[in-house]
């Protein structure tokens, strides 16, 4: 299991969190687990065919996002052993599960959701105090978001 877990969602804040986590993993000589989670959009009634298309599109997008994140870590911190995980469901729930027993959980201060204008996003708010390991919330000044 990786000692550091980082959540990514494709936002600039998540990129800052990824960069921080890669540097931290390099400094600590430990592994890094890059986690992304996709959810179905809050559309009221999808037809069965449309729902399958949306699910497949979300899954493929998440897999591409995590591949790009892993490649970025390889460039930033080539000595770090990187694993990845793509899941579905509530991001905070998956992140908390994956961070069980980790040394550190790293998230951006806000993501791509409807709360993007707020200082602290909903996922980062929900993992603070609930994780069984220390949580680093990378601020906008570090990540450029």
Image (spheres, rainbow, N blue to C red):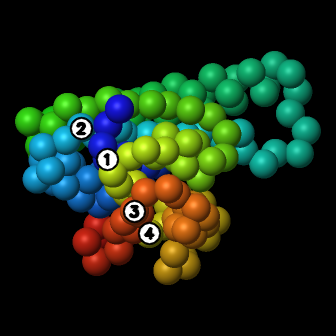
Question: Which residue is label 3 attached to?
Answer: 134
Q: Earlier in the sequence, mark 3 or mark 2?
A: 2
Counting other residues with Cα less than 10 Å from the Cα at mark 4, is it few (<14), some (14-19), or many (20 or more)?
Answer: many
Mark 2, secondary structure of its residue? loop
Q: Earlier in the sequence, mark 4 or mark 2?
A: 2
Query: Spatial distance from mark 3 to mark 2, Cα to Cα?
Result: 16 Å
Counting other residues with Cα less than 10 Å from the Cα at mark 3, is it few (<14), some (14-19), or many (20 or more)?
Answer: some
- Give the label, 4 or 2, closer to the camera: 2
Q: Earlier in the sequence, mark 1 or mark 2?
A: 1
- Give the label, 1 or 4, closer to the camera: 1
- Give the label, 3 or 4, closer to the camera: 3
Verify CB contact (< 8 Å) between mark 1 and mark 2. Answer: yes
Mark 1, secondary structure of its residue? strand
Left or right: residue 128 compared with residue 65? right
Question: Which residue is label 1 attached to?
Answer: 4
Q: Earlier in the sequence, mark 1 or mark 4?
A: 1
Mark 4, secondary structure of its residue? loop
Counting other residues with Cα less than 10 Å from the Cα at mark 2, is it few (<14), some (14-19), or many (20 or more)?
Answer: many
Residue 7 appears in the rendering: yes
Query: Spatial distance from mark 1 to mark 4, Cα to Cα?
Result: 17 Å
Query: Spatial distance from mark 3 to mark 4, Cα to Cα?
Result: 15 Å
Specify the label residue 31 is tagged with: 2
Using the image, determine if residue 9 lies above or below residue 81. Answer: below
Question: Which residue is label 4 attached to?
Answer: 109
Residue 10 appears in the rendering: no
Residue at the image point whose x is 86% and y is 33% from the top:
46
The x and y percentages for residue 104 are 35, 54
Verify CB contact (< 8 Å) between mark 3 and mark 2. Answer: no
């Amino acid at each position: 299991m990786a000692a550091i877990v980082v959540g990514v969602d494709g936002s600039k804040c998540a990129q800052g969190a990824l960069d921080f986590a890669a540097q931290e993993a390099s400094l600590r000589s430990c592994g890094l687990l890059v986690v992304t989670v996709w959810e179905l959009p809050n559309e009221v009634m999808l037809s069965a065919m449309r729902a399958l298309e949306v699910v497949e599109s979300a899954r493929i997008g998440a897999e591409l996002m995590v591949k790009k994140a892993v490649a970025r870590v390889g460039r930033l911190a080539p000595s770090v052993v990187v694993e990845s995980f793509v899941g579905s469901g509530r991001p905070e729930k998956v992140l908390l599960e994956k961070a069980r027993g980790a040394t550190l959980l790293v998230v951006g201060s806000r993501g791509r959701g409807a709360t993007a204008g707020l200082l602290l996003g909903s996922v980062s708010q929900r993992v603070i105090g609930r994780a069984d390991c220390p949580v680093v919330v990378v601020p906008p000044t570090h990540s450029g978001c």
